[in-house]
Image (cartoon, rainbow, N blue to C red):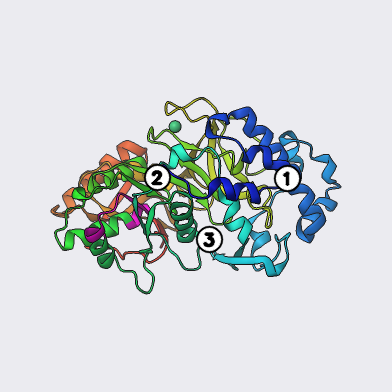
Amino acid sequence: MEFLFEKQLRSISREPRLSRFSAMEEADLSLPVMTEFQDEVLKIMVNRVYNHDTFYRRKMVETGLKPEDIKSLADLSKLPFTAKEDLRGNPWALLTADKKDVSLVSVSTGTTGGEEIYIMQTWKDCFINEFAAGTKPLINLGRGDICINALPYEMSSAGLSFHKVFMDICAATVVSVGKGGAYSTPEKTVNVMRDLQPTVMITTPSYAITLAEAAAEINFDLTGLPLKKIWLTGEGCSPAFRERVEKIWGTKANFFYGSLEAGVLGIECDAHAGYHIPLSQVILEIVDPQTGEVLEPGEIGEVVATPLLHLDSPLIRYRTQDLGYIDPDPCSCGSFFPRFFMRGRLVDHVTVNEIDFSPFYLEEFLMRLPEVGNWYQFVVQPGNNEQLKIRTEPAPGVEPTPELAEKLASRMEFSIGIPCEFEFVTKLPRPGSKTVRVVRQ
Ligand SMILES: [Zn+2]
């Protein structure tokens, strides 16, 4: 595996106080070294925001904090949180560099809607500071690999971020097929794949299914492609849904967990046992969603991220609204990065009979029913909160009868412990943007 220009770029990019870390080889990296690195970056970041950023300076002054109060990671919890709402409609809020130095602006509205959030990146933050130590064995991509990048390239930073990592850092070949843009259709993407024979693809779980349907239309067998890996990102899914993707494509599918605002937060290894937290890229904390108190390893709470490589637009203690827990125990793959386990999102829980369910938990049981197709919706009905309504396509070749609906409903009820109702539909709309699995009726 070759990583182009890395050493040279690292040497000119880092803060002087971080140069000793830049010079390290992969083999020198360890948990204590990463902790020292995080301590150093945190101190630099806090100094920068206090002196160059009115948004964080005001937050720190309000809580009576001075930069010298933050000496190490142990002091991180003294710093105030940053919420999505703080960033909405406030384009330049996080910038510590000159406006003229901004080279890339991405836009996010999030799944919940509202005013836009702008992600500003200077050339330094966007490019040369993106080399995260310790992630190479997890990404495992290099010269000669042909990567289909089926993520959105417009507005969002998703497509461009992975484009940059695969092309500039891994020295792989990238095909910018995008996901549903002006020139990007599933049919065209399948043709490109047939012609170029990719070894890697990155996309969302639902778009992997959309592409597979386009391939089926022209009787193109995806399992004949030389794909060694599919990276899934942008949306979560259950292990059972992932298994469907792996079966259809005939290859392994691993997750990249991240947020548009905070970047990459977790990289899944082939053991499929949680997402490794790239400590060279981000500090993750798990906090109580109500009190904000930092929780212990193993306790489920909200994920709070402090990305480390964006010193020109720092984001401190960003509340992602995702839920999960951290497992510091070693992984069978050998990576020393601790692992994060996703447990859904704060905003899209389904409540039935006064019990909260993560859609991924419900999906896990649904996708184990072979008669159920790959497209479905959980329908929340105000005033009828005693049962879960599931609207779904039948699997190809399955006859959608009332008897089958009854049978599936009782199997789901057996699995999740609440009454269910099935409604079969011929075809649900294919989403142009993020897939909506929970609808309100
Ligand atoms: Zn692992």
Residue 141 numbered mark, or none: 2
In primary-sequence order, the first of circles 1 and 3 is: 1
User: Is residue 89 found left or right of 235 in the rendered image?
Assistant: right
Task: Bin the neighbour count of mark 1 within 10 Å (Cα to Cα): few under 14, some 14-19, many 20 and up.
Answer: few
Question: The disc labelled 1 sits on which kind of residue?
Answer: Pro
Question: The disc labelled 3 sits on which kind of residue?
Answer: Gly
Instruction: Please report the residue visible at 31 percent of the width from the left and 66 percent of the height from the top.
Output: 429
Q: Quadrant of the C terminus?
A: bottom left
In primary-sequence order, the first of circles 1 and 2 is: 1
321, above or below 268, in the image: below
Residue 399 numbered mark, or none: none
What's the CA distance linking mark 3 and mark 2? 29 Å
What's the CA distance linking mark 1 and mark 3? 36 Å
Cβ–Cβ under 8 Å for marks 1 and 3 = no
Q: Is mark 1 within 8 Å of ligand 1?
A: no
Q: Secondary structure at mark 1?
A: helix
Task: Bin the neighbour count of mark 2 within 10 Å (Cα to Cα): few under 14, some 14-19, many 20 and up.
Answer: many
Q: Quadrant of the N terminus?
A: top left
The boundaries of the magenta stretch are: 193-207
Question: The disc labelled 2 sits on which kind of residue?
Answer: Leu
Q: Secondary structure at mark 2?
A: loop
266, above or below 119, in the image: above
